[in-house]
Amino acid sequence: AISWQHPEEQLKYWQHDFSKPTLEEPMELFTDVMEKSVQVHRRKYLGHQTTPTLPVTVLSGALISLLNQGMGVYEMGMVGNTLEKILTEDLAQTLGYSAEASGFVTSGGSLGNLTALLAARAAVTKVWRKGYEEGLKPAVLVSDEAHYCIDRAARIMGFGDEGIIKVPVNDRFQLRTELLEEYYQKAVADGRQVICVVGCAGTTSTGSYDDLETIADFCKQYSIWFHVDGAHGAPAAFSTHYKYLVKGIEQADSVVVDYHKMMMTPSLSTALIFKRGSDAY
Ligand SMILES: *Cc1c(COP(=O)(O)O)cnc(C)c1O
């Protein structure tokens, strides 16, 4: 499923290809691109995180490219904007939310997690309107096993090294919830405002699910935003057999779910769901 090529060789190959006259017959180029890519559609492909896409999504991808609708303004993407609402609300129902929940689609889980943290910060600080006021030092509490994009999102938001507080995991790579209180109190003593706790519903390396119910209780106690990174694992909610893994997810203020991993759509496509739809604004 993969014929690996050194980056230097690959670069040379395509530089040469690029210098050739414009193709009138694109099939040669298409075949070449297919052969040099990872063959996720082949039987021998053993999944990393990106799955083979469902055949119908290949056709819808072509349709979308033809129509080329922007989504930034309603009238530029009337169908897409409407479907976005219906799809995310339907997913919210599957996760166990009430009718108040709603969301939107982002280009990937990394952007979804950043957007969720921005919403959390806007909800519990005045940063959105006033910027960083003297003495404000926001922080997030997150499992040591969380995806690197959470760390990066916090840095993008200006939290710095000390604003990402990593809580150790147990032997099943789940956040040790009994340590939350200690890490929280230490942050407060250091003058930090913990704005959010991030739970993992399927860690990237081991597929471990955090105890979401206990994290939800903790967040309620201190009025902290509870975000769940369910990029890979939240679709367990669709399975009668496995949905116990995401118990408590419906108590999260926000959840990220990648459509392009377990839900077999082309990448990147992610639902960001808010318990209170109005938080999306
Ligand atoms: C894949 C993944 C992400 C990042 O998602 P992208 O869609 O690749 O941006 C975030 N969190 C977890 C747990 C993931 O598995």
Image (tube, helix red, strand yellow):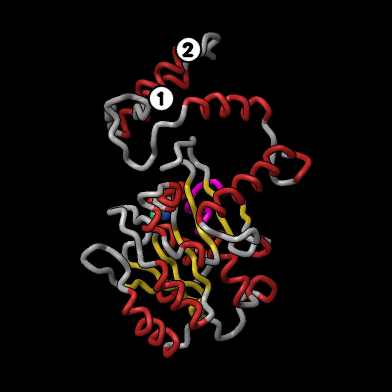
Q: Position of residue 158 (x, y in %)?
A: 51, 70
Q: Residue at x 51, y 62 (%)?
A: 250
Residue at mark 1? 14
- Seen as rendered, the residue at the extreme top is 25
Above or below, 65 relative to 246: above
Judged by depth in the image, the label closer to the viewer, 1 or 2, is 2
Residue type at mark 2: give it: Met
Q: Residue at x 60, y 61 (%)?
A: 98
Identify the magenta region: 104-114
Tell me, yes or no, whether the highlighted magenta stretch contains residue 108: yes
- Seen as rendered, the residue at the extreme right is 75
Above or below, 2 relative to 257: above
- Cβ at disc 2 under 8 Å from ligand 1: no
- Seen as rendered, the residue at the extreme front is 240
- Seen as rendered, the residue at the extreme left is 171
Q: Residue at x 35, y 64 (%)?
A: 210
Q: Earlier in the sequence, mark 1 or mark 2?
A: 1
